[in-house]
Amino acid sequence: MFRLLVLVCLLCAIPLASCAVEPTATIPPPTLPPTITPEPARPIPTRPPTATPAPEAPTLWLEQNLDSTLRATIQEIAAAQNLTIVSDPAEAALRITLVESADPLLVTEEVYVVADRFATLRNGVKFGDVQQVWEGKPTDTIKELIVTNDTATALTPLLGAPSDLVRIVAPEALTESVWQTPHSLAILPFDQLNPRLSAQPLDGQNILDRKLDLKNYSLVVRVYLEGTAERAPAFYNALHDRLAATNRDPNRMTSLVMTGVTAMGRFTAQAIDDSGDPAFPARVVAPILSQADITHVSNEIPFVDDCPPNLVHDSIRLCSKSANIKTFQVLGVDIVGLTGNHAGDFGYDNYLKTLDLYKANGMKYYAGGRNEEEARQPLVIEHNGNKLAFLGANSFGPQSYWATKDKPGTNGYDAEKMKQAIAQARTQADLVFVEYQADEVYAYTPDSTNVQIFRRTLNDGADVVTGVQNHHPASIEFAKNGAREILYGLGNFSFDQMYDDEVRQGLIPRHLIYNGKLLQTELLTTMLDKYAQPRWATPQERENILRGVFGASGFKLE
């Protein structure tokens, strides 16, 4: 047993010896590739900077023939826009020019007027004659043109360089120079007209007509802006904010026509009845008078439904049939002056019914009313931004027809109360018009009482004082500054006096108000026909009327 065990042990030892573990070999660490040391960074070559075009120079060129006021305003606007004014138009980013290019921006336009003095028989001029005198060749009726330096400068591109027959005067001397120089005419901007001048139609184009198309009018200077698209809009907007688009804006114009005695009673009433047309008195003159923005009548008598014609010339109790209000409708009457001395001929009830009739027909009234307070109130009308106040009074009487605290009637004249009323109206309006039923004078020359009342009223602040009492046209005078005026009598408009030519004559002043200023007074002239119907005077009749009026006014005609 023992031997067997030894043998087993020996047999087991052999494989154990052969299984002895040999020492472990050492594995060398992996060999890393050599480290590459970077070279110092080389500077990256850069391109030289590309030259950026400099912004367009903010430069402006101005046409040399701009008037001084316009030039100064544009220069002020340019300075605010940081624009530099240059002398060479080729170097300018923006240009103010008088020449219309392919794509201009209209900055403003200046409308110019040829004007005579107020006391003239002239009724229009030809552009060709004006051009001829400008160039140094007088005509039979125009020997000299009188302008300011600004006007001469502005019109040079249009008319050429002025000749020796173009006299340059200071602005304040222009009007008086025309009055003192026979056969002379002024040329001036439209908005610088004044009542002592008479704007003349040019080739038949009446610049005072609000509907006139300036495309057919020769004396217009237009100012344009040219320039780069980037700069022009900003500068144009700045110009637009400061400059008026035109010096003749139709939307700032108001025309007012005023008429003389209207009393559609007696033989006038009979003529209306015979015609079968209650608007018979209006038919000839209405196409012109109805076109005014404000049409006025002075109606001296009440409307009475069953008023019969009283065919007695010396009858002083007058009325008109209510149906004859159609005359006023056709005339386009807007306002009615109630100073007449026949207002109460048919009692208080008919007077009040007459007021109601005006109201029902959209006609406003003044200088009369339901009581003294209403009769003294100014009538204020605003049109196209122009505010006009209308007042009136009766100094002739009868005082029994004057309104009182509790009785209707006309506004009785009181100098102090009128002064206060004018002052009140002045706070509400640009212009104050006062009319009077004063002493009736059958002559071109007013009596001393009327002169005293009318002049006092002008001195108290009225702009226009008008006598509606006269059955005969009368003289005209101006305040020292020439901006305010008196018309002492307009004569008959529609009344039955036909016994001589002078009581048939009528004046219709057509006032033009612009931007709150009385710019012009045109004198339309009429003759009464058929005891009722005014018609336009013929050229000879017109000359007779104007010679009588101007002569009594102390105005010398050429």
Image (cartoon, rainbow, N blue to C red):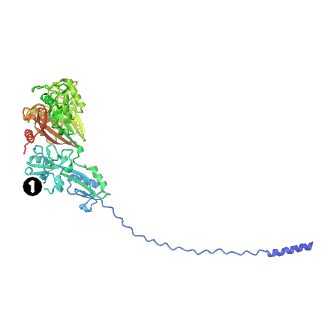
**What kind of residue is marked 1?**
Lys
Name the image quarter holding the C terminus: top left
Within 10 Å of disc 1 (Cα), the crowding (few <14, some 14-19, many 20+) is some
Between 264 and 420, the residue placed more toward the observer is: 264
Between 7 and 524, the residue placed more toward the observer is: 524
Total number of numbered labels? Answer: 1
Q: Is residue 202 above or below residue 381?
A: below
Q: Residue at x 16, y 38 (%)?
A: 285
Image coordinates for residue 54, horizontal then vertical, percent: 33, 63
Q: Is residue 456 above or below residue 90?
A: above
Displayed quadrant of residue 463: top left
Name the residue at the right extreme.
1
Residue 213 left/right relative to 144? right
Image coordinates for residue 386, horizontal then vertical, percent: 23, 40
Displayed quadrant of residue 346: top left
Image coordinates for residue 93, horizontal then vertical, percent: 28, 60
Q: Secondary structure at mark 1?
A: loop
Q: Residue at x 88, y 74 (%)?
A: 7
Name the image quarter holding the N terminus: bottom right
Q: Is residue 479 above or below residue 19?
A: above
Image coordinates for residue 392, horizontal then vertical, percent: 18, 32
The residue tagged 1 is 137
Can the viewer see residue 54 in this picture? yes
Can the viewer see residue 459 in this picture? no
Between 202 and 366, the residue placed more toward the observer is: 202
Residue 57 left/right relative to 444? right
